[in-house]
Image (tube, rainbow, N blue to C red):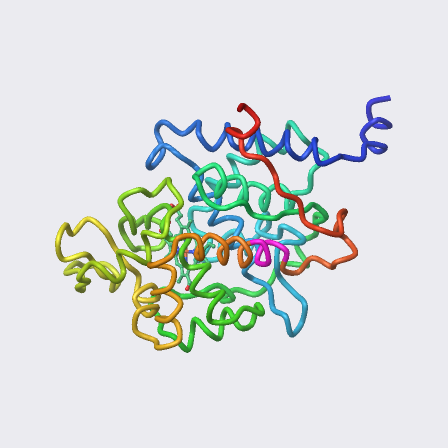
Amino acid sequence: QSAKVATNFVPTKEDYQKVYNRIAEVIDDADDYDNGSFGPVVVRLAWHASGTYDKATGTGGSNYATMRFQPESLHGANAGLHVAREVLEKIKQEFSWISYGDLWTLAGVAAVQEMAGPKVPWRPGRIDGFESHVPPDGRLPDASQGAPHIRDIFYRMGFDDQEIVALCGAHALGRCHTDRSGYDGPWTFSPTTFTNDFYKLLFDEKWVWKKWNGPKQLEDKKTKSLMMLPTDYVLTQDKSFKKYAKAYADDVDLFFKDFSAAYSKLLELGVPTQQFVASEAWIMQTVDEQNS
Ligand code: CCH
């Protein structure tokens, strides 16, 4: 009986909104974790699940949620993301009809929106794949590298310079962990609120190399409490990147608009268009909007 109900169940936008609402709750239930939110690590999961896409071969991307499998779950770039996968597994148990790819990307959208970021168009349609779909290691960016590497990685996914700079503004959120990437510290003073502070700080603060035994990273000269990765700093050094980074530092609305478009595109990489349920992506409501 129940199996029959499950197979015939065709979820509507309202059903996905219920999942969104549960995600918003679970992200917030993090008293003992980092800054009291799983939001940033969930955003990173959605990005790493999608950013493996290779447009030349059509492999990788968010479609099959392959990070559930080894060796992808063990790829160095994904260290620590088990935290996000485990948090979302609770929701998968409650809403077994949703695919992992849809769950992880919807969570990435909910996290950005609930942390006061822009609305991000999203639609369901990803299907669960198999270990055979796991992409090779090395498709995600290496933080110790320069502009040519960043371009190689993001052009491979189909992004241009403007989109690259917009996407990297997600580093307004969260922090680096020495036991995950080896790097240490947050980028901004408000790591659980989505802002354009990442760009503002890049230009307004004086950045110096941190003296420590860890990997090469920068710290702000004034407070020594914030950090930038070498790849972040490149956004102020490369002429083309700098133009966009400056524009986003000066105009938060422009950043929100461009981030929303690029992030929405990122989360759909690798998903065949015919798999999408809706011809146009949906705007999910924030918890606040539903309560007002
Ligand atoms: Fe990132 N990121 N990221 N990043 N990232 C790290 C953490 C976060 C790079 C390297 C790192 C994007 C682009 C890049 C987030 C979102 C995005 C860390 C620390 C490294 C290293 C991991 C740790 O130690 O826990 C590099 C290199 C690039 C590009 O060149 C893009 C694009 C996005 C999303 C759109 C978020 C959020 C975090 C914080 C995670 C947390 O756990 O707090």
Residue at 53%, 24% in the rendered image: 292
| Front residue (pair 233, 89) | 233
| Front residue (pair 124, 116) | 116
Q: In this view, does 36 lie above or below 47?
A: above
The x, y position of residue 30, in whole percent, is 40, 29
Residue at 34%, 29% in the rendered image: 32
| Front residue (pair 136, 276) | 276
The x, y position of residue 103, in whole percent, is 62, 41
Number of numbered discs on residues = 0
Q: In this view, does 264 lie above or below 88?
A: below
Left/right placement of residue 227 relative to residue 241 reads left
- Answer with the quadrant where ligand 1 appears in the image: bottom left
The quadrant of the rendering that contains the N terminus is top right
The x, y position of residue 233, in whole percent, is 30, 66
Left/right placement of residue 135 relative to residue 112 reads right
Query: For the stretch drawn in magenta, what is the main secondary structure?
Result: helix
Left/right placement of residue 186 relative to residue 100 reads left
Highlighted magenta segment, given as a residue range = 264-268
Is residue 274 one of those drawn in magenta? no
The x, y position of residue 189, in whole percent, is 26, 44
Residue at 24%, 64% in the rendered image: 216
Q: In this view, does 199 lie above or below 27?
A: below
Q: In this view, does 38 lie above or below 198?
A: above
